[in-house]
């Protein structure tokens, strides 16, 4: 049913509850994924450096270093690849989701969750690694706008000669918007292209990511079209390379 080959992907599970780790690990290994585990955030960071997972499922409520702090540390640590990070928690409050997205999380899952549903979500997220989320020509690797450069191949953004390593969803979002300057992307289009129809995220997810992008690249590039969505705009036409 899936086009993905599970044994090509490494998944790190992080939770201070051994029973949950064993339960999730068993089901993911049964599916064919390469699975690593960690009982706390500090061990998780070492596992990320060592095993370079494609996806991390990270519990929020942990001692020593909670999931939010761990996520933020991973995103801010050099020489770490850009894994998909999914926060797993029994809490469903909006503030917890917003804090997670602010820290660089890509998705949010509330437990308990059935193994089949979790595996389906994982497939949906991993497909994002191999699927183009915008309409930029595949031969075009770099977009340049004034003091902003977006390098699709290296997954980096350069602003005023400063290199930024953005969380995956932030990068995909700016790349999507910049692919068609002055084109208005509706909120539904953005959800579909960045998160996919099979991934359920909160209503404020896009707003949080847009705010974080503006903090990093400046307020001039992304414009809000009230009641519709967002567009990328700049007075200088783009240069492609």
Image: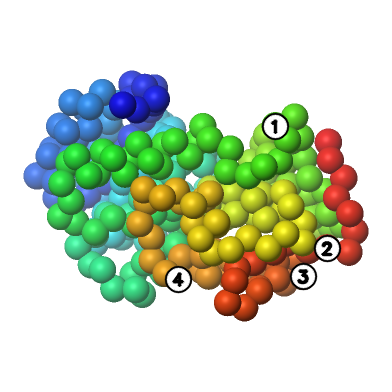
What residue occupies the far right of the structure in this picture? Answer: 236
- Give the numbered dot on residue 50: none
The percent position of residue 59, horizontal first and vertical second, equals 26, 54
Kindly state the secondary structure of the residue where label 2 is placed: loop
Residue topped by disc 2 = 234
Between discs 1 and 3, the one toward the N terminus: 1
- Which residue occupies the foreground of this view, 17 or 89? 89
Q: Report how far apart the C-alphas of labels 2 and 1 lie in the structure.
A: 22 Å
Q: Residue at x 50, y 36 (%)?
A: 129
Mark 4–mark 2 CB contact (< 8 Å): no
Q: Are marks 2 and 1 in contact (CB under 8 Å)?
A: no
Residue plotted at (15% across, 55% down): 112
Local crowd size for mark 1, using a 10 Å CA cut-off: few (<14), some (14–19), many (≥20) = few
Labels 3 and 2 touching (C-beta < 8 A): yes
- Of residue 156 and residue 27, the one placed in the foreground of this image is 27
The answer to whether the residues at label 1 and label 4 have Cβ atoms under 8 Å apart is no
Label 4 vs label 2: CA separation? 25 Å
What is the spatial separation of the Cα atoms under label 3 and label 2, in whole angstroms?
Answer: 7 Å
Q: CA distance from mark 1 to mark 3?
A: 27 Å
- Residue 102, given in percent of the width and then of the height, sits at 48, 65
Secondary structure state at the residue bearing disc 1:
loop
Residue under label 3: 220
Number of the label disc, if any, that sits on residue 204: 4
Looking at the image, residue 143 lies above or below residue 59: above
Q: Residues within 10 Å of mark 2 (few under 14, many from 20)?
A: some
Secondary structure, mark 4, is loop
- Pointer 3: residues within 10 angstroms few (<14), some, or many (20+)? few
């Amino acid at each position: 049913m899936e086009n993905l080959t599970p044994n090509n992907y490494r998944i790190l599970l992080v939770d201070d509850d051994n029973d949950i780790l064993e339960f999730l690990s068993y089901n993911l290994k049964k599916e064919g994924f390469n699975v690593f585990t960690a009982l706390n955030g500090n061990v998780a960071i070492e596992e990320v450096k060592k095993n370079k997972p494609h996806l991390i499922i990270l519990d929020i409520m942990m001692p020593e270093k909670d999931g939010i702090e761990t996520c933020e540390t991973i995103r801010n640590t050099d020489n770490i690849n850009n894994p998909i990070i999914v926060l797993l928690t029994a809490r469903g409050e909006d503030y917890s989701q917003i804090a997670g997205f602010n820290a660089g999380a890509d998705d949010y899952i509330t437990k308990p969750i059935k193994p089949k549903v979790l595996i389906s979500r994982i497939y949906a997220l991993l497909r994002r690694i191999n699927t183009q989320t915008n309409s930029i020509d595949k031969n075009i690797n770099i977009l340049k706008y004034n003091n902003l450069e977006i390098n699709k191949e290296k997954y980096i953004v350069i602003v005023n000669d400063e290199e930024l390593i953005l969380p995956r969803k932030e990068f995909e979002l700016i790349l999507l918007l910049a692919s068609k300057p002055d084109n208005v992307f509706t909120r539904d289009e953005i959800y579909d292209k960045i998160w996919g129809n099979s991934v359920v995220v909160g209503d404020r997810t896009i707003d949080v990511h847009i705010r974080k992008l503006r903090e990093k690249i400046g307020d001039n590039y992304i414009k809000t079209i009230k009641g519709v969505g967002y567009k990328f705009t700049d007075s200088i036409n783009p240069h492609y390379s």
